[in-house]
Each structure stands twice: as C-alpha cells, then as structure tokens.
Amino acid sequence: MGESAAMKVEKVKYVLWAADWERCLEFYRTMFGGEISFKMEVWSEIVIAGATIGVHGGGEGKRTWTGLSFQVDDLREGIVKLKECGGDLTAEPNDTEEDPLHLAMCVDTEGNEFMMTMKRR
C-alpha cells in the first residue's frame, strides 16, 4: 500500500446542548474560569484548562449525563461556587473520615450533569 499523508487532528471538542446558550457559556466561564473562543447562537466554544467545550443552542434543558469531569483543587469551594453560579448538586456528597470528600455529582444551568472531583490527599 502506498503511504498517504496522515490526517491531522486539530482539536478535540466535547459538545453540550443548551436551552439558553448564553447562560450556559456564562456558567462555565464563571464556574471554571473558561475563556470563550467563539460565540454565536448555533455554536459557541469555551476553553477550560486547555479543553474545548462546544455549546450548541436549541437544547431542551432535560437532565443529561455528559461524562464530563472537572478536577479542582478545592472541592468544598467548588460546591459553593457551583451554587453561586446557578448550578446544583444531584446529591450531597459524602464526607467521612474513612472517605474524605473527593467527588461531587453536579448539574449546570441547562440540565447537563457532570462530575467535579478533587485528588485524594
């Protein structure tokens, strides 16, 4: 077989649907310090810790598991900020001496569920 030029992957994006795309962008910008790199109603992009999240308008706002996980340095502070930004917990996380707080199941303003984690110390 002849050699062909390898296709180059330029960027990997994870896509979220949003009933209110501007509210969604603001949530991720404020919550995680994201930088909006492209913005319009049909498609927007926000970069968080080097990862690109695409936001597609026209979502229904239904609860949807995304598979996204954000590792933060202070989970307790992250939970406070989550609520300040309009998000919520899907369940209060456990925090015991045997199992210190390291995982919170969260939901953004658009119903997209994600994990927020902290490295075990």
Image (cartoon, grey):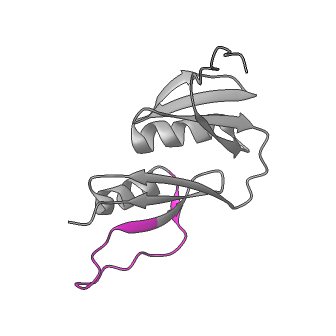
Tell me which segment is drawn in magenta. Answer: 86-104
Please give the name of the residue rendered at 26% of the width and 66% of the height, measured from the top-left corner: 120
Q: Is residue 12 above or below residue 95?
A: above
In the image, taking residue 23 as reference, residue 27 lies left or right, namely: left
x and y percentages locating residue 13 in the rendered image: 60, 34
Relative to 36, say whether 101 is above or below: below
Residue 86 pos. (x, y %): 52, 53
Query: Which residue is depicted at the point 50% across and 41% down?
Result: 28
Q: Which quadrant is the N terminus positioned in?
A: top right
Q: Quadrant of the C terminus?
A: bottom left
Magenta highlight: main SS: loop
Left or right of 114 in this view: 61: right
Q: Is residue 99 placed above or below 76 in the rendered structure?
A: below
- For image coordinates 43% across by 58% down, the residue present is 116
Q: Is residue 70 left or right of residue 24?
A: left
Q: Is residue 106 above or below residue 8?
A: below
Q: Position of residue 98 (x, y in %)?
A: 25, 85
